[in-house]
Each structure stands twice: as structure tokens, then as C-alpha cells.
Amino acid sequence: MERVQESLAGQVENDEESSTSESEYQHALEVVFDEDNAKRRKSSLVSSENPQLAQQTAKKRESTSCFVHQLLENQRRSRRSQPTITHNEDRLCDKTPDMHNQAVHSRLLTKRQLSEMAVNVRELSKKLGSIRLKLKVKTIFLLTKAHDSDLIGLTRDITEWLLSKERDTLYTIYVENTLENNRVFDAQGLISKDPSHEGRLKYWNNELCKKQPHLFDFAITLGGDGTLLYASWLFQRIVPPVLSFALGSLGFLTKFDYADYQNTLTTAFKHGITVSLRLRFEATIMRTQTARDDRRHDLVEELIGVEAENNLTHKPDGSYTILNDIVVDRGPSPTMSSTELFMDEKFMTSVQADGVCVATPTGSTAYNLAAGGSLCHPENPVILVTAICAHTLSFRPVILPDTVVLRVGVPYDARISSWASFDGRERVELHPGDYVTISASRYPFANVMPQGSSSEDWIGSISRTLNWNSRQKQKSFKEWDEQSMEGKSGRSKQ
């Protein structure tokens, strides 16, 4: 981390001057590790990405422009230059047949690697919160509520302003492909007004965000917290810095006023931005390879026991990166669900409830709040676990460190299946014997903050939006004054 800090100190720019060259910028927010370290249990293994695709991604990183990833890339290079020492205590019971491939998923990392990742992200986040980053922005990703005609009109205004030749840079703007033929957005009208717009007004879809996230230097959202969550969902790994204009209901994450968008964006592009790195979770569905009607099997035994060399108990079936929460609940069933919780290689408890909510600090004010969980400052490196309508008087919400791997599973003898959702999306059925693995993601969410903002602003936001601890002030006592009472008594006798 020393080289990262030195690089950071060397790149911090004052409000008056900037000396950062284009070659010093990179685009991805990603934490990278030694690829030959031991991994977790082999059933949790998700096949690594296509090696050719990984090489192409690496080349793109070298030609893109995000300062934050340059810091993390420097850290990776400094580690590769040092000899790697493997400790026996790092080796868990997870032997993998794919050891030669890079570990892409954070749940495959050892305890030491997870701790190292978490500490590095925290330290970098603290420093990024106190400096201003000046980026070379050329390609801008624009996201809005495609079904809201009012917001589409505002999106057209900001698009036209960004495309104008009056800007210092000729920006390329990507809007959602559904707006191409939208009457309110009127893309053809924008192009006919200025023919130069045609080559710089482009359209994105989900596939483009998934396969080419490095294409975008900067992201702007118009909407509420849900719109920003959708941006996080679109960028499952690499996330460009996201600046959000508050056009929704609550606004925990949307900090900028749209009425002043011209000054806001001009300041951001000319003088730099302040970034807050938000913790995200990586969740993977694990499917049992055991016959579902075989009740003799025990999920606890499978997850904390040692697997046979050629007998994988579970198989991965999709991974998701989330910003708010993972919810495992009873779904459409009228009866309560039964789930079992595991922390690292230990069994925690069984939960008889409507479900379980596992939330990030950012998601503490969402479903976690409604389920009775703790409010948590977004800078806390924790995992919040809250039962939803638990059928017990003794269950209390728990807060775990972000260096653990959490598993939420459906026991083999459960009466019903459970259902998992990820940031309120991608509803997936979990059959008896299946489970979800949850760990801190290597890809934090870069949220652009207003200049001069502080951690105390979070208290103001929950007070403003949720009326936190709002009540009428208790009246003070009226002190007894014996002399005045005697005076009043005397006057009454007269």
C-alpha cells in the first residue's frame, strides 16, 4: 500500500493547478491479487473468465482513463515484484482443479487475501474522500428512467448541453437504446440541429455495459436511489465514477441538484471530483449435486466438512454484484422459510422466518431498515444480517466484518424452497440443498460526492428523509420560587 500512497500523494492536485498526464489515468475500480494463492472449498469454484477475454480487458485498462484504477494497478505491480510466500494457515480445505487460472471471484480468496483486500480498499477510500481527482473525460454514460416522460425531457436537455460545441471537450454521449426512437427525447431533432452530434450521440444496452465497461469514462444518472442501483446492476464489475442528480423520492445516494447541472458538471470536468468508494457484495448461487429427495444428507455436514477429491457437493449457477442487499425469503409460499447460516467454515444458526436480509452499509436504510436491522454509516466495513419476521423472541440482527464469507442455505429437510433476490432483481429459486455465497466484492462502487461533503452528511440525510429521532422536545420544569409564591399569597390576602 506504500507505493499506492506515494502515488496518491504525488497525484493529489490543488484547486488551482493540475499536473496529471493522460498516461497516469486508468479506468477500472478493481482490486487485484496474486493469482497463485490458495482458494476456498472446491465446490464454490466458478470457472475463470476466458483467457483471451481477460487479455483484451487488460489491454483496454492500459488505454483507458481512470485515476483510481491506476492507484490499484500500481499496488498490484508492486506486489508482483515481491516474492510470494504461502502460509499453511492460508490453505483451507478447498482444493481446486483449476489452480492455474486467475481467481476472479472474491469468495475464492483466502482469509488473508480477503482481509488484505478490505484494508486496502478502506485506506484508498479514506484518501479519495479528502482529495480531488481530475479525470480525462471523453465518453459519458447517461442513465435515466426510460418510462418517465419528464425525466426523458431533462435527459434530452443535458445531452444537448454536453454535445454542444461550446464545451471544452467534444464528448461522446451514450444514452439507453430505448431513447433512439423516443418522441420526447427526439434524437433525430438533436442531430438535425447540429450534424456533428450524429457521430457523438450513441446508444448503450445491457450487453455493452457487461462486455465493455471500460468504454465509459464517467457516468451520470437522473433519478433517485433506484436509478443509481440500476447503474450498479448494469456494471457488475468495473464501474466508472457515477454522479447522480436527485430526481427521486428519498435521495440517500443522489447528492446533486439537477437545477444546477451545468455548473456541477463544468466544475467536475474542469476542477475534479471527490469519490466515495461504496462496498459491494458478490453473491453466487450454488446448486446441490445431491438427489433432492435424499433426506439423509445434511447441508451443515456438506459445507463445514471436507469434500472428497472427486465429489463436488455443489456447483455454481451464476454470480451477481450488488450494492444494497441480498434477500432470501419464502417467495410465493404462505408458510415460513427455513434457512441455515454459515460464516467462513463455521455453522452460525438456523433461521425460521419469512426470510433473511444480508445488507451492505449502503443498503442498511433499505429492506434492512424495514426488517428492523441497524442503521449503518456507509464507511463501516461490515455485513449486516437481519431476519425478516423471525418466529422467535431471541433473534437479533447481527453485524459481521466484511472479511468473512457468508453462506445462506436451504436445508435438505426444508418443507419449501426459498427465493433469492439481488438488489430487488433477478428472482431465483433455491431448492433444498442449494445455498448462496456472499462476500465483499473486489469491485467497489465509485460514487461522486459534492465538494466539501463530510461523513456527518449521512446523519443529515437520515434525519431529512426518514425523520430519524424526530420528536417534540421535552419541556423543562418550572422551578419553585418560594419568595414569589409568598408575595402572591400576601397580595391575595389584601
Image: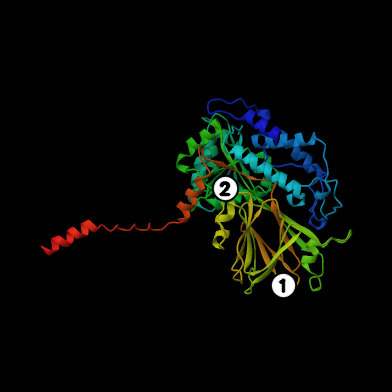
Q: Is residue 303 above or below residue 220?
A: below
Q: Is residue 387 left or right of residue 254?
A: right
Give the image location of residue 341, x and y in percent. Answer: 70, 63
Q: Is residue 184 visible?
A: no
Q: Is residue 20 above or below residue 112?
A: above
Circle 2 packing at 10 Å, graded few (<14), some (14-19), many (20+), is: some
Reading the image, the residue beneath label 1 is 414
Q: Which residue is at the front of the view, 133 or 23?
A: 133
Q: How is the image coloured?
A: rainbow
Reading the image, the residue beneath label 2 is 179
The amino acid type, in three-letter code, at marker 1 is: Ala
Give the image location of residue 217, x and y in percent. Answer: 63, 37
Circle 1 packing at 10 Å, graded few (<14), some (14-19), many (20+), is: some
Residue 419, by quadrant, is: bottom right
Q: Is residue 212 visible?
A: yes
Give the image location of residue 118, x and y in percent. Answer: 68, 46
Q: Residue at position x 72%, y 36% from top?
A: 75
Q: Which residue is at the front of the view, 48 or 168?
A: 48
Give the image location of residue 41, x and y in percent. Answer: 81, 56
Which residue is outermost to the right?
310
Q: Is residue 371 above or below residue 24?
A: below
Mark 1–mark 2 Cα distance, whole angstroms, equals: 46 Å
Q: Earlier in the sequence, mark 1 or mark 2?
A: 2
Q: Is residue 301 above or below residue 171?
A: below
Q: Quadrant of the N terminus?
A: top right
- Badge 1 marks a residue whose secondary structure is loop
Residue 438, by quadrant, is: bottom right
Q: Is residue 92 left or right of residue 249?
A: right
Q: Quadrant of the C terminus?
A: bottom left
The amino acid type, in three-letter code, at marker 2 is: Leu
- Badge 2 marks a residue whose secondary structure is helix
